[in-house]
Image (cartoon, rainbow, N blue to C red):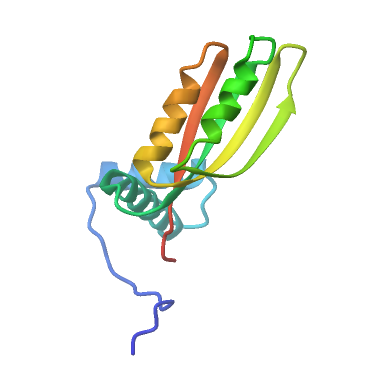
Amino acid sequence: MPNPDETIRFSVSLPKPLLDELDRRVVRKGYASRSELVRDLIRERIVEETWERGDEEVAGVLTIVYDHHQRELTQQILDIQHRQYVHVVASTHVHMDHHNCLETIIIRGMPAEIEHLSLEIAGLRGVRFAELTRASRVQN
């Protein structure tokens, strides 16, 4: 029976300019080797494809910055989070200054549902920044 943790070596042929770019990224991003960077690129693509397929549960982190003086905005954000279909696992709330709050919302559910929740919150009046970080299960 094959060991799923076994590392297999294989070679890849690249044009010199592409290899040079790969090496620049290894250095710039602090990777120990080309292999580490390539593994991360493959994992990122797997996550992207999982979200694109939309057929399995995924996770995401919605980061928002908003004006906490905006009338009823906090309640609107909470109301959206309490709707069914998307499971809010946890959230954090930080007061950045007198007007701005930073919130992270960890969400689990189907990709389309998470995207919908994210867009709905991002579109609220008083939300100044919103970004969804996508994640999914990735083997090794």
- Report x, y in % for residue 38: 38, 55
- Does residue 27 sit above or below 46 in this rendering? above
Q: Nearer the viewer, residue 41 or 106?
A: 106
- Report x, y in % for residue 94: 73, 28
- Report x, y in % for residue 13: 22, 57
Q: Nearer the viewer, residue 117 or 61?
A: 117
Q: Quadrant of the N terminus?
A: bottom left
Q: Quadrant of the C terminus?
A: bottom left
Residue 46 placement, left or right of 114? left
Instruction: Tell me which residue sits at (57%, 12%) in the image.
Output: 126
Instruction: Tell me which residue sits at (25%, 60%) in the image.
Output: 12
Instruction: Tell me which residue sits at (28%, 44%) in the image.
Output: 52
- Does residue 74 sit above or below 38 in this rendering? above
Q: Quadrant of residue 35?
A: bottom left
Residue 47 placement, left or right of 126? left
Residue closest to the far bottom: 1
- Report x, y in % for residue 91: 64, 39
Instruction: Tell me which residue sits at (41%, 78%) in the image.
Output: 6
Q: Quadrant of residue 114?
A: top left
